[in-house]
Structures are given as structure tokens and as C-alpha cells.
Image (spheres, coloured by chain):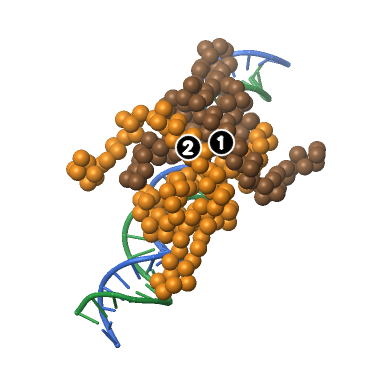
Chain colours: A brown, B orange, C blue, D green
Amino acid sequence: MRYSEHMCPRFQYALALLSKRWTGLIVKALLDGPARFNELAERLQVVADRVLAERLRELETEGIVLRQVSACMPVRVAYSLTTKGRDLTPVIEAIETWSHQWIDPSTVGATADDETAIKA
Amino acid sequence: MRYSEHMCPRFQYALALLSKRWTGLIVKALLDGPARFNELAERLQVVADRVLAERLRELETEGIVLRQVSACMPVRVAYSLTTKGRDLTPVIEAIETWSHQWIDPSTVGATADDETAIKA
DNA sequence: GTCATTCGCTTCAGTTTGTCAAGTAACTTC
DNA sequence: GAAGTTACTTGACAAACTGAAGCGAATGAC
């Protein structure tokens, strides 16, 4: 990875991590509690399996996500946040606050397009 | 854009914006004060001109960045943050705090690789 | 005047990164 | 023994990013 000389490398490293596509959403989803792979894929419907697997592997090596495999019969894999991961809460909260202050629901676009719209 | 049904669309929209490559770094750079295009490109050495121009255009349409063209002789373009943009400060600060708490300088990799290393 | 330079981009070719659909290996249930 | 579940992986394709070069207007150096 390359860094700008004019900014703190640690900040740049963290930013690169967090601004990888879907990283924020995955962390947010895991803040709601641990989940198995398919469960997580359900929570974040927009993320392709391939990328979800990749991101989770990256987040695991970064020590943000914990991967626990149960030796049981239909091999279950549970993903959860480590302390390092849970410490991202203020970042997520800051984004939530900002989005509620500045993002106009109408800007967001067709929010419920498919079946959700029919149900509503 | 597509959204997960299980999370606030405003949050997802904000996250998509902020997690686009280089967006965070550009905002951070502009928090240090307004800058012209080439000046900004210098501050963020890692961003290709093409993408910088594109990101700035996006951030302008989002109302985060203000683009002011001086009618003077060698057309100067000044970029600065709007209030909406400056309100991202808590987000940037949260990431800074986290990175200083959790990112080990040695993890960051070869911090100063080129000439910087020779000078040190 | 003509050449080279600065400014704010844009264009091009090539690599990286992401998407979608399908497949796989191990095991259970019918 | 065929079908389903779980956690991924694979492959073909598309979108996004990179680095180097170009471009048009306006100087400044000679």
C-alpha cells in the first residue's frame, strides 16, 4: 500500500480498511450480534458471496472479526466482532448521526422498489 | 443503488458515499483548508487525477464540497468543504481515534520507502 | 512572435476489483 | 439414493482505478 506523506499513515491504513467496499456494512451488521455466513449474507443482501467471504477473511486477519468453526455435523461457522471490531462503534455512530442530519430520504432514491413496495 | 432491507437506507447511502475509494482522504485533506486542484493532488499523492476529478464532482453534487472558479487570468479553481462536509469531522475524528488505539505502526508496512527513508 | 510552462482537467490502455450464476464437498433428511 | 443445507469457490463478465500522456487557454522567457 502507498501512503501520502502529508497524512498520518495509521489513519490512512484505517481509512483504507474501512473504505473498502462493504466493510462498513459488514461491521454494522455484526454489531447487531454474531452471525453465520448465510445469515450474514441475508442481512447484507447487496454483497456478493465471493466478496463477503473475502472481506471476512481480511477482517479476520486484521483482528476485527472472529471466525469460530463448530466441529458439529453440518459444519457451522460463526462470525463475530472482536474488541477491536466493537471499538468501531463510535465510527459507525458518527456516520449514522451525520446521515440522519444530512441525507434526505428522498435523495436516497427508490428505497423500496421490489416486493417491499407492494407490502407497504 | 441497491439497499439491504435490514438497515437504514440513509445510513447505507452515507456509507456508500464515504466508502468510495479516496472520499475519506479527500474530505480529511480539505479539513486542513481549501485547496486548488493541483494543490489537492499534491496533498493526496496516492490519488490519480482522473479519480480525483471524478470524486470532487461527486462530492460537489452531494453538497459536501464547494467548487469556486475564479474568473481571473489563469483559471483557478478552489475546492472547499461546505457545512455538510465540515460536519463529517466527528466521523474522521472517530477513525483517527480508533486508528491510534488499534493500528500498530509496524502493521502499516513500509511507511517510508523511497527517498523519505534515505533522509531519515 | 514562438517556445515552453502552468492549470484543470480528459483520454487511453491496462490492471484490479466487484458481480452474478453456478458448482462443490461434506453431511442430513426423506 | 435423490434432494437439501452450509460455507464457500469458480468462471465469465463488467465496472472502477492507475499512470502516462494530451489538451486548450493563458501567461512568461527569450
Quadrant holding the C terminus of chain B: top left
Q: Quadrant of residue C12?
A: bottom left
Q: Position of residue A33 (x, y in %)?
A: 60, 22
Q: Is residue A49 above or below residue B74?
A: above
Q: Quick one: SS at disc 1? A: helix
Viewer-proximal residue, B19 or D16? B19
Would residue B21 be seen by someone viewing this image from the given angle?
no
Residue A44, how many percent across, how many down? 61, 34
Marks 1/2 same chain:
no
Number of other residues with Cα within 10 Å of mark 2, as a class: few under 14, some 14 to 19, many 20 or more: some
Q: Which numbered disc covers residue A8?
A: none
- Distance between the Cα atoms at labels 1 and 2? 9 Å
Residue that badge 1 annotates: A94
**Helix, strand or loop status at disc 2:** helix
Please state the chain letter of the residue tagged with numbered disc 2 in the rendered image: B
Whole-percent x and y of residue B113? 26, 41
Asked if the residue under mark 2 is in contact with the one under mark 1, i.e. CB atoms within 8 Å, the reply is: yes
The three-letter code of the residue at mark 1 reads Ala
Residue B24 visible from this viewpoint: yes
Instruction: Residue B93: give its label.
Output: 2
Residue at image position (59%, 41%) is A98
